[in-house]
Image (tube, rainbow, N blue to C red):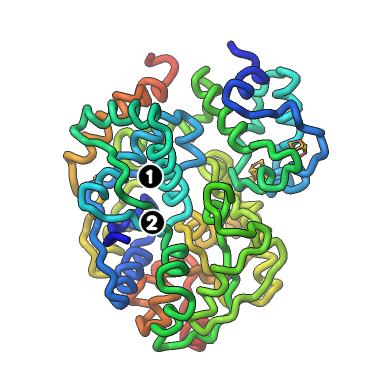
Amino acid sequence: MTKPSQLLEDMGFSIQTCMQCGTCTGSCPSGTYTSLNTRRIVQSARRDKDVLNDDDLWMCTTCYTCQERCPRGIKIVDAILGLRTEAVRNGIMLPEHRKVSQMVISKGHAVPINDDSITKRLQLGLDELPANVHKFPEALEQVKKLLESTGFVELIAEEDSK
Amino acid sequence: MKNLSIFLGCIVPNRYPGIEKATKLVLDKLGIDWSDLNGASCCPAPGVFRSFDKASWLALATRNIALSEAMDRDVLTVCNGCYGSLSDANHEMKNDPKLAKATNKHLAGIDMEFKGTSDVRHIVEFFYEELGVEGVRDKVTQPLDLKVAVHYGCHLIKPSKERGFGSVEKPTFFDELVEATGATSVDYADKMACCGAGGGVRSALLDKSLDMAEHKFKKITEAGADVIVNACPFCHLQLDYGQIEVKEKNGNEYAIPVLHYMQLLALAMGYSPEDIGLDMNFIKAGNILEAKV
Ligand code: SF4
Ligand code: SF4
């Protein structure tokens, strides 16, 4: 496995310029309520610690406040997203995220239609089914084919079913 | 500028159809030529799918854009997340030939191709640029006497390099559009703070996600706002249904009605709360709006 520092370097993120000022951590809305410490993630990646298995990776809401404020212009959030990608490639993924991914593969939407919403649509005078893949089965087939083609279906499959 | 296709995403048509209705009513009233984007899928959500696998995120997003290209229309989004995904994807496809080639290879498998002929717009940005604040004010027939807590939502303005709307710490364009309806935008502490839903946090770590939302509920209540207005259905869900979830979690009760900007504008153009599904929200708007509208 590529070392985290090298990995981020390869993706074009210059985390080595971090001066550990903590502006990112101080700006983080998630860190107030979770264990997420943005500065520490950057530090861990620099020191090649096992950040891919760090739960904090998944606590970032991608609000981009830290990235906007970083005095060194480090693309912190993009780097966190890059680390997530590598984690997923290594089979590390929260079960809820696997589920929502499977939802997109099977229904074409992360939040698919339900009966309650159909009732509301009809009350509003809208079509029963919205004009998305729900109404066009051939479009859903396209989505499935596309996600097969990119390897997403296999990537998201449960470890034991691979 | 081309005519528009409306990209609704997941949450609007599948959970909050009142926002879909309001959007279509408003566009009709303004005489803007729009069409449904038939066969669209999940955008797919930027903070989640892009981080899982960029090639898949890009392929799916590009398919949605290509659908609009085939109709010779620009894509109009009503959601910060959809906007983030589609405008970033559009930008990358137009500017990175290698990436475009790889993505088009996947699309060829479903007989589609990205050509780079359409733009992606966000409804707030679109109104601000194309109609302007005065243009919106001109269309108001029923000025609203409401104190509004404006929630921009992170991805409308950030990352600022990609969005280019100027100040991310103290933007004003959305407040100006809100005030064009006659409403007053009230300042509140941590106004630019995240609602807590993004990045897959709501889906996987609901409890923590709600703590972030509750922080906003507290500040907005302290500021004495009548309603929250947003431009993103995922924030809308978090801020509306989130109040119910917070109550279940710790008993703290908030009762701040939540409106998408299209719903606020529809009210100001004379539509009733029922016309645009406000009574379908989890937090009922009834009393506040009846007194004020
Ligand atoms: S704000 Fe930037 S320089 Fe400061 S600690 Fe965070 S990443 Fe490092
Ligand atoms: S983008 Fe993530 S890490 Fe940065 S401030 Fe927001 S929640 Fe914290």
Quadrant for residue A12, please give it: top right
Tag 2 residue: B77
Q: Is residue A52 at all visible to an observer of this figure?
A: no
x%, y% of residue B87? Answer: 42, 47
Residues indicated by labels 1 and 2 sit on the same polypeptide chain: yes
- Image quarter hosting the N terminus of chain B: bottom left
Compared across the picture, whether B240 is left or right of A130 comes to right
Quadrant for residue B33, please give it: bottom left
Residue located 38% across and 31% down the image:
B97
Indicate the secondary structure of the residue bearing disc 1.
loop
Q: Which mark is residue B16?
A: none
Which one is in front, A70 or B245? Answer: A70
Tag 1 residue: B43
Identify which amino acid the numbered label 1 is placed on.
Cys
x%, y% of residue A92? Answer: 54, 22
Compared across the picture, whether A156 is left or right of A31 comes to left
Q: Is residue A73 at all visible to an observer of this figure?
A: yes
Ligand 1 falls in quadrant: top right
Residue A108's place in the image compared with A29, above or below, is above
x%, y% of residue B122? Answer: 43, 58
Identify which amino acid the numbered label 2 is placed on.
Thr
Around disc 1, counting alpha carbons within 10 Å, would you say few (fewer than 14), some (14 to 19), or many (20 or more)? many
Which one is in front, B244 or A70? Answer: A70
Are circles 1 and 2 on residues that touch, CB within 8 Å?
Answer: yes
Decide if ligand 2 comes within 8 Å of the CB at mark 1: no
